[in-house]
Each structure stands twice: as structure tokens, then as C-alpha cells.
Image: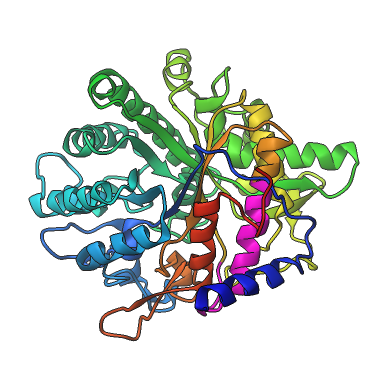
Amino acid sequence: MKLILFYCFVLGFLSRNTNGDLANKKFPENFRFGVATAAYQIEGAWNEDGKGENVWDRFLHENPFMAGYQNGDVACDSYHKYLEDVQLLKYLGVNHYRFSLSWSRILPTGYVNQVNQAGVDYYKNLISALVENGIEPFVTLVHFDLPQPLQDIGGWPNPQLADYFADYARLAFTLFGDDVKNWMTFNEPKQPCQYGHGYGYFPPGYATDGIGDYLCAHTIIKAHARAYHIYDEEFRSQQNGRISIVLDTYWYEPSSDSDEDKEAAERQRQFTFGWFANPIYHPDGNYPQVMIDRIAERSKQEGFSKSRLPEFTTDEIEYIKGTYDFLSLNTYSTYLVNWTEEYPIGNPSWDADISVTTYQDPSWIGSTSPTLDIVPWGMQKVLSWIDQTYNHPEIFISENGYADNGDLNDSQRIDFLSQYLSNVLLAIFDDGVNVTGYTVWSLIDNFEWLLGYTAKYGLYQVDFDSPNLTRTIKESGEYYNNVIVTKCPVDTCED
């Protein structure tokens, strides 16, 4: 009876959708559904069993106010409760679980000369439990949490880190590759670069906008390529897996039909997504030409002797391009873009290098996570743009989700999921985009970086006031299970 009442509720709720018709087609038979988490956000046990310190440990211990005096020291305690979390996954019926390794839990100093066996055993046990329950592991090597000793030698702007990351990646492939067939090198590298070395909001908190962020990205892109080639040349033939990088973007919609606004929107897309995607996914490689030209010109006017954007050599361009087996996308919302006059020449910055205006329509429905308004049609548009811009790659949606206050009756999340999934279907069937998977962020409520525990993304509620950190499924979790079983985001779909 409970289940019948629940589905009656879903039917009634979806019938009052205000963002257009919902797609009533089924997802293809081989389409994969999953959920995601990240090590720092759920594991806790920040200094247990030989784990080393990472940049988020240091940053929030030294600057506790940055996340409202909250941190990931305990988080969801998944280090101790991982078997319980695997059962949550099994109940949902997901095909895959995307999670990240804590580099510092495996290599406490960041270097391969000291391997922490307790950390290795934790991930081996987690991966074994997933495989035994028919859940495919999708493993991210770095999800923001660089080991602090590597930050102490300069962090990602130091090109030497590409070598240390390559060593770590090789070790991870060796340890876990027999059971892991899908790898992601980095999660959203734009965030630690732009917010950590540009704006200074993320660790290490360096405000070197327009310089440090570009240096950071340059190293990470080369580090990704190193890991790809290591896997391709040393492991692929035996392990038969795949490897990618997780890139994130909003959809950027021109605010009018004017050529100027259209050009501004495309410029924003290239500076946001193309910054990392072009060197890897574009047939020509290298950074987007609009970035190369604009940063070089503004650097010259600012009095620099050369562009603030580092250059790839011809050999590096060839080495980096094509280092992917699929395109992994995180996307949540949409912005409108206006053309604007050039920002004044003065202090360099990423925003000034773009010189456009972005904003969200006040009429759009918001969430408890700032800047993540619900704009379902942006999902279809961003998928179609990526498909056309990057020569029709396989696209795997590795994060998409909605933040609220954590109620079990999370009807707004059900609305969000139904509408965004419908727009994935529109991209597949109307635009011919090769989307092969969808991943909800997140399995459980967790630590959401500078938002602490105030933004709840989970399909399961976590009671952070209970000693056991009790997990309870939300109505959206029941809804998502039904989507996975029926491959249909609404009550009835065409066969």
C-alpha cells in the first residue's frame, strides 16, 4: 500500500510540471544509471589508520569559518560504514557507483615511496563488495583532495606534480585495475584551479587570478594525459578498462538573438568547458583559439612580456589530444549571457579575460545550493553543444542533482530528476547524442565543501545528529529506483 500511495504521489506531482512536456520514451536497454560520492565528502576518518593530511584537512582546520565551522573529519563515516552504504546502493538497483580514492589514504605523503596498506585494503574491500553485489565501480583518482605535502611544494602550478600524479595513477591501476573498468583521472579540475589558485576560496586559498589558475590547469591537463598513456600502454590489454576525465560546465544561453550575445555565450563556454576539453577532446587539440588570442592581447596591454596562458609545445598538443575513451560530464544548471564592453585593463583575472556578463533569470526555481537554479532545458542544450563541438563523443553524465534541506518528502528533487532525465532523452532521441549513462549526485547527504552540511543532495537522508549517522531513503530514492527498473522517468513510456 505504501508503494502504491507513493507512485500515486509521483503521478500527481509530475502532472503539474511547469517546465514543458516530459519525455515519455524509455532509455535504451544498455543505458546505465548510478549515483556518486567523493572521498572527502563522505569517508571521515581523516587521520585514522595511517591516512595522510590533504589540502582540505589543512584548509578547514586552519580556516574553520570558511565552511561554517564544519568539515569532513567525520562526514558520513563511510570509512567505517561502507558495507551499509553498499546495501543502500543495492536497494536502489543502480548499475554503477562513482566514488573517489583518497590519494592521502593510499599514499600519506603523496609519494609512492610510502604505501599505506590499511588504505589499500579499505578500497579493495569496497570494490569487492560492489562487484559482489553487481554494482560497477567508476573510480575517480582525485576529487579535489590533493595530499598536503604536494601542496607544500607548490601544488598544481608546479609542473613536477604531473610526475607524482603519474606515479600514483600507475599504482592505482596496479592495485585495483583488475576489478575497476572505468577510471576518471580528475573531477572538475576547473574548481581547484579557479577557486583554489584564482579566487582563493578553495584550498590552498591563493588569490592569483588570471595567472595561478592557468598554471594549475596546464599541469593537470598534462597529468591527465600522462595517466591516460600509462593506462593505455601498460594496463589496457590486460585489464580491458576505459579512462576519462570529469569536466563540468553550466549551459550558457545567449540572453537575446543578437550576434553579440551569441558570441559572448560561446566565448563563455570556451573559457569554461573548452579550457580543459579542447586540449583533450577537440581534433585540433590545444586551448580554444579565443582563449589564446584574448589572453595574449590582454597580457600585452597589461605589460606582460608574454601571455599569461601557458603554451603547449607541438609535441605536447599531440600527446594530449585524444586521451579519452568517453567524455564524462558534470552539469547542474544554466546561465544567461550578455555581451558587454571589455573589462578595463588592470589587475589580470579570468573574468576580465572573458569580459561578458552572466546571470540567472529571477523567475527560475532555485535550490539550497547557490547558483544552481532548476533549468531542465539547459541539459539538452549542453549535451547537444558538446556533441556538435567535440565530434560526437560518447557522453557519460557523471553528476547531476538537486540540493534541498534534507526532508524525506523531497518532491522538488523528484521534479528535478524527472525533468532533467526527460531532457537527456530529448538529446538522445531528438538530437542523436550518444549519452550512455546518468549519475545522480548524491547517494547520501554529505559534506558539500564551503556549504558544509547545509545543502542536502542525497537520495538518502543522513541524520548528522545521531551517533550512528542513520541513513533513511527519501521519496526521490524510491522514484529513482523505479526509473532504473522501468527505464522511464514518468509513469508510462512508449516501448
Q: Quadrant of the C terminus?
A: top right
Q: Position of residue 375 (x, y in %)?
A: 71, 57
Q: Position of residue 355 (x, y in %)?
A: 73, 45
The residue lying toward the viewer, choosing from 486 and 423, is: 486
Examine the rendering and report whether any part of residue 352 can be seen: no
The answer to whether residue 268 is above or below residue 373 is: above
The answer to whether residue 216 is above or below residue 314 is: below
Start and end of the magenta stretch? Answer: 403-424
Q: Residue at x 50, y 30 (%)?
A: 310
The answer to whether residue 75 is above or below residue 318 is: below
Examine the rendering and report whether any part of residue 47 can be seen: yes
Q: Main secondary structure of the magenta part?
A: helix
* Left or right: 483, with 264 as reference point: left
Q: Position of residue 110 (x, y in %)?
A: 20, 46
Residue 14, quarter of picture: bottom right
The residue lying toward the viewer, choosing from 286 and 11, is: 11
Q: Is residue 417 magenta?
A: yes
Q: Residue at x 64, y 33 (%)?
A: 433
* Left or right: 350, with 316 as reference point: right
Give the residue furthest to the right.
258
The answer to whether residue 106 is above or below residue 465 is: above
Q: Residue at x 78, y 55 (%)?
A: 21
The residue lying toward the viewer, choosing from 464 and 82, is: 82
Q: How is the image coloured?
A: rainbow
